[in-house]
Image: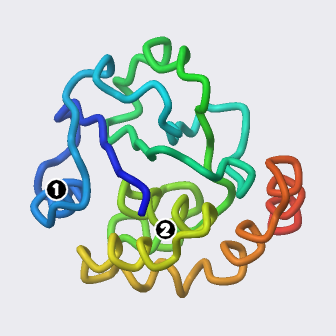
Amino acid sequence: MIPLYAFRDNSCDPRKCTVKRMERSGLVRVLSKISRIPRTTILLDPTAEQALSPADRPSRSLTVLDCSWEVLDTGAVSSFLRRRALPFLVAANPVNFGRPWRLTSVEAFAAALVILGEPGQAGVVLATQNWGPRFLELNEEPLGLYAQARDSTEVIEIQNQYL
């Protein structure tokens, strides 16, 4: 099982915050300062230049940035060595259903866990949301292919087939 962390700056709507449910279930440790994020973590960052791939296994931990992207100081996270972007996936959450790249933090965790070979843990994470299991259904084919890729380059090639 991969330890999960979330940096939260409270800039998002607390009624829609998926990480809060995960936190209540004991599945994630929430951090309020970027400096507290473990330096060895894989940081899920949509501005990262490299895509997450199975080559990132074994990972010591996984961290999402649970905040509004409009206010995030991207310079503060640019020093992390293992920043990774998720490839093309479609949201299942009620706010952005069917939109590509508009994932909640729970969906981002689940996608990363599947790609890193932890589908069981992904299911547990998604079970915190009533719509969660739908995410795996919507993205079953691409997630399966991404999880079989050798490296980031191959993940991007698979992504380009979808685009």
Question: Where is mark 1, residue-wise?
Answer: 23
Q: CA distance from mark 2 to mark 1?
A: 21 Å
Front residue of 156 and 150:
150
Q: Residue at x 24, y 22 (%)?
A: 33
Residue 94 screen position, x and y as percent: 33, 72
Residue 145 screen position, x and y as percent: 77, 74
Query: Is 122 on the left or on the right of 32, as rendered?
Result: right
Q: Residue at x 54, y 14 (%)?
A: 79
Residue 42 screen position, x and y as percent: 53, 39
Say what amino acid the circle numbered 1 marks. Glu
Look at the numbered disc 2 and give the secondary structure of its residue.
loop
Say what amino acid the circle numbered 2 marks. Ala
Residue 12: numbered disc: none
Residue 131 placement: quadrant: bottom left
Q: Residue at x 24, y 54 (%)?
A: 19
Q: Residue at x 40, y 43 (%)?
A: 64
Where is the C terminus found, in terms of image quarters? Answer: bottom right
Front residue of 148 and 1:
1
Q: Is residue 55 above or below residue 40?
A: below
Residue 158 placement: quadrant: bottom right
Front residue of 76 and 63:
63
Crowding at label 1, few (<14), some or many (≥20) Cα neighbours within 10 Å? Answer: some
Query: Is 157 on the left or on the right of 65, as rendered?
Result: right
Question: Where is mark 2, residue-wise?
Answer: 91
Q: Is residue 84 above or below residue 78?
A: below
Look at the numbered disc 1 and give the secondary structure of its residue.
helix
Residue 35 placement: quadrant: top left
Query: Is 51 on the left or on the right of 44, as rendered?
Result: right
